[in-house]
Amino acid sequence: MGILENKRLVITGAGSGIGRATSLLAAKEGASVLAVDIAESVKDTAALITSSGGKAMAAQADVSEESAVIAFIDQCIDTFGGIDGLHANAGISGGRKSLQELTVDDWQRTLSVNTIGVFLAVKHAAAHLVSQGNGALLCTASVAGLRANAGGIDYSASKAGVVSIVQTVAYQLYGTGVRINAICPGLIETGMTRPTFDLAREKGREDRIGQINPTRRAGQPEEIAQMACFLLSDKASYVNGQAIPVDGGLSASHPWAFPRTPS
């Protein structure tokens, strides 16, 4: 029996990367998954699950639109008979523009997906979870939301907002039996970070990817999925209000000069 046996979950940003990896692992661990993404590739995620004998449905939706969020939460309940957890994972990179290049439109787009999208998903899932007296909420933040130099200004601010949502909502849900946590991934190889990986490989510097963390490598979506499924499960019943880095150790340190091999 898997750690998510009989759980009914909504996972956003499930068309690729961390969202897809979490959806696949959650289903393997026994969950019924409503996979949500604005991209049509979310249908492939659901198909991968069902072809392996799991339970999944796909929903294409923009997480920054409240009516769409209400609709996919209702879809999970209608399809699977209820909801036990949510992973608000959908996000965009923001493009890493400099301070002077950033526009108000850039800020509004990044925050609408990364922060408002999380708020809406948490708000509407929590209403159902509170009414039944149990459940788990999980948000994807980032190490960029903890300290500088892991993302652009708008992206970093949006992810710091996610951390604050988690910490504040944990106390707003005081005594309800509903938990909320965040994962703060480090450098993970996904569609969002692909340009960084492609450039390093093009220049023959793939061995430098992730060199500033003590694990000396980048992470894979499946490694984030392992933590996500744990936090969504009853195994994490005493973990609440936390923003947990999964970053190879990157956020454990103040700035430092990593050891260089003599040339």
Image (cartoon, rainbow, N blue to C red):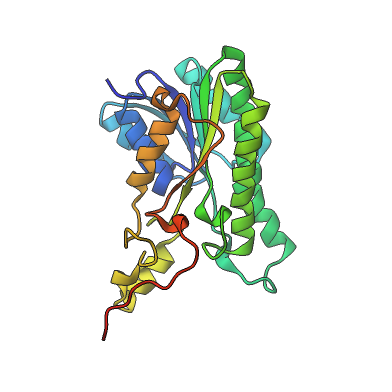
Vertical relation: 243 (above or below) 206: above
Examine the rendering and report whether any part of residue 141 can be seen: yes
Q: Is residue 207 left or right of residue 4?
A: left
**Residue 113 in view (yes/no):** no
Instruction: Indicate whether 235 appears above or below 165.
Output: above
Position of the N terminus, as image quadrant, is: top left
Expressed as whole percent of the image width and height from the top left, the position of residue 139 reads 53, 39
Viewer-nearest residue: 124 or 228: 228
**Residue displayed at 53% across by 17% down:** 134
Q: Residue at x 32, y 62 (%)?
A: 216
Residue 89, percent across and down?
A: 50, 42
Q: Is residue 248 left or right of residue 165?
A: left
Q: Quadrant of residue 29?
A: top left
Q: Give the residue furthest to the right.
A: 104
Vertical placement of 37 versus 153: above or below?
above
Where is the C terminus found, in terms of image quarters?
bottom left
Q: Residue 108: x and y, percent? A: 70, 55
Res. 152 image quadrant: bottom right
The residue at the far bottom in this view is: 263
Residue drawn 26% across the image and 26% down it: 53
Q: Residue 88 at what x, y percent from top left? A: 53, 38
Comparing 256 with 154, the one in front is 256
Query: What residue sits 50% from the left and 17% below the top?
Result: 82
Give the mark count.
0
Decide if residue 53 is on the left or right side of residue 78: left
